[in-house]
Image: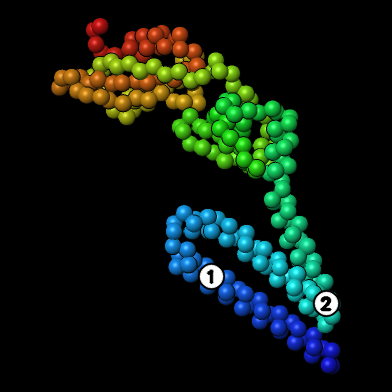
Amino acid sequence: MANLNISNLGIYTLLIVALILFIALRLLTWLFPLIITKTERRKIALRYKSLCELLIWVLFLLWAVQFLYTSNQPFAYALFAILFLIVAYSAWVGLKDIIAGAFLKATHKLSINELITVGDYSGKIVGFDHSNLLLETALGETLYIPYSSLLGKVIVKMQPAESIHRHSFKFEVDKAHSTREDTEKIRGFILTMPWALLKKEPQIRYVTDTTSDKQIIEVTLYSIEKEHFQDMERLIKEKFSTSQD
């Protein structure tokens, strides 16, 4: 009975310490804006807050295993098993992208400023960090793609000759033909052309009125073969333009 009481006392002590630690961490989170007043430093601290909390709980479990080992060995073994799983999972999460990155760089020989397409992503490589590939899209967005998500996927390297070219021109249409439906007809017609770039749709906008029943429309075409822009412009004007030029 005495051993049982000692064992229970150890568990109760452990639970009280865990509760105090939990409250202290929550209180620290609430006081963060008051302790760290500078915005940049606060951002850095918040970025590593979760990692620090995980480390604190791991240290607590280590202490708990040692604390309970003499009074309640089964409970201590259970805590050690939980601790082992947490450490193993954390190590896997932290290392899987680093390992995948090493394999990716070695097998594909990727380099900065290369144009690639992989899975649903396409753009220019602008950097490699320890766990992510940095890809800049055609819209100027920077994507942070974990290396582990790229394993097993086909990576297509685009040649400089496949750079995207653009061509803009204007023509006149009847104002009655300046509806959203007519815009979609023009866009659909352009995308049926063999030279049109399907990954970057043409831009169509109405610029200004010329007369009460006429309107100027501006079309921007995208293609990897700029020598066909004149043919594309001619075909579009023949089909949709109402001017007599």
Q: Residues within 10 Å of mark 2 (few under 14, many from 20)?
A: some
Q: Residue, x 57% and y 31% (percent of image)?
A: 125
Height in image: 106 above or below 37?
A: above
Describe the element under mark 2 as helix, strand or loop: loop
Q: Which residue in the structure is indicated by mark 1?
A: 28
Name the colour scheme: rainbow
> In terms of image quadrants, where is residue 13?
bottom right
Height in image: 58 above or below 151? below
Residue at the spot x=75%, y=73% of the render?
Answer: 63
* Side of 141 where 57 appears, left or right: right
Q: Residues within 10 Å of mark 1 (few under 14, many from 20)?
A: few
Q: Nearer the viewer, residue 6 or 52?
A: 52
Left or right of 244 in this view: 118? right
Residue under pointer 2: 69
Residue 236 at what x, y percent from top left? 36, 13
- Number of the label disc, if any, that sits on residue 78: none
Q: Is 73 in front, or is 234? A: 73
Q: Position of residue 188 (x, y in %)?
A: 42, 22
Pinpoint residue 105: horizontal percent, then vertical percent: 70, 32
Q: Is residue 47 above or below residue 151?
A: below
In the figure, residue 75 lies in which quadrant? bottom right
Q: Residue furthest left?
A: 212
The structure residue drawn at horizontal position 48% and vertical position 36%, both measured from the top left corner, is 141
Give the farthest residue toward the top: 245
Name the image quarter holding the C terminus.
top left
Tell me which label, 2 or 1, sits earlier in the chain.
1
CA separation, marks 2 and 1? Answer: 31 Å
- Which of these two is toward me, 140 or 183? 140
